[in-house]
Image (cartoon, helix red, strand yellow):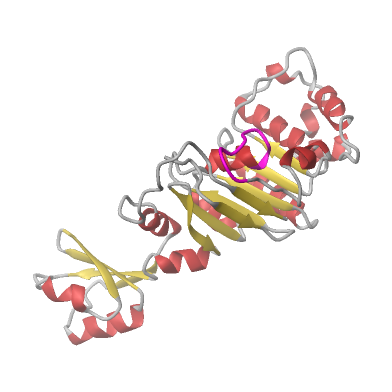
Amino acid sequence: MRAVDGLELEIATGGTVALLGRNGAGKSTTINMLLGLLPPSSGTVRLFGGPPEAAVRAGRVGAMLQDGKAIPRVTVRELLTFVTATYPDPMDVTEALELAGLEEFGGRRVDGLSGGQAQRVRFAVALAGNPELLVLDEPTAALDVEARRAFWRSMRAYARRGRTVLFSTHYLEEADEHADRIVVMDRGRVAADGSGTAIKRRAGGSRVSFDLAGAATGPLSGLPGVSAVEVRGDRALLRTADPDATVLALAGLGLVRGLEVTPASLEDAFLALTSTEAAPAAPAGAGARSAKETV
């Protein structure tokens, strides 16, 4: 099975883009190809109009990956000073420390930091080249709630400079809150691409729930806009693309007891788009077929 199958992404400058998918959907493979760490088995990968390796060497791309070991016997500031010296137009070390929330840790040894602090160091290293594109693979995995909020404040501030941020995450609420655009991957392909609002609309728009009070459930699936019906005890939950029409129909049936209307969540949409029935499996093959990103 191909890890990535004909994927093409065109991302506008200055936005934040979330890459979502179940484990094995192809997210990490896509990121590794974009960074030139993994060649595709067929097809080509182009970044800023050229090979990814050239963009990385020029400092146009910065990356924060999940894996990484602390370098022993060097301080945070020493590490960043060394890394910035390898780029033609680097970010100021003090600025990188501030953006990563490491101002007070510059003199600390990298191998003596906590997991969350080490994660911030990886973020600062990704910023070292002052990149136009910042690629982040599960960037908040080791951070506590307060550190996660501070991280995303920094991300939004960085994007407002006209930079582009591409990140993968398993925290769906982060994608919903902080991404201008969400790309959902499934079986190596794009299952959905758009704003959080647009993708949630694909999940059925809204959920309408109410007390059955002994009423029959058979007619519910035929109500206007309803795409799915779930019964939990004496309460029915309807997924609907037209909540107004659904509620009017329920009123006509006298089923308005305990009525609640809530918008579909990103989790609802994600599960609907990546279920085993959501799309056919990708054809068998040796690896990734092609991937392209234009910024």
Magenta stretch, residue numbers: 34-43
Is 37 inside the magenta-drawn segment? yes
Name the residue: 71% across, 45% down.
134
Name the residue: 73% across, 56% down.
295
Residue 95 figure quarter: top right
Report x, y in % for residue 214.
8, 70
Q: Nearer the viewer, residue 48 or 156?
A: 48
Report x, y in % for residue 78.
84, 22
Decide whether the magenta segment is chiefly helix, strand or loop. Answer: loop
Report x, y in % for residue 135.
67, 43
Q: Quadrant of the N terminus?
A: top left
Looking at the image, residue 288 sits to the left or right of residue 279; the answer is right
Report x, y in % for residue 16.
66, 55
The answer to whether residue 101 is visible is no
The answer to whether residue 180 is visible is yes
Looking at the image, residue 197 sits to the left or right of residue 203; the answer is right
Residue 206 figure quarter: bottom left
Against 84, is 182 above or below?
below
Is 264 inside the magenta-drawn segment? no
Name the residue: 20% across, 87% down.
252
Q: Nearer the viewer, residue 11 or 147?
A: 11
Name the residue: 42% across, 55% down.
270
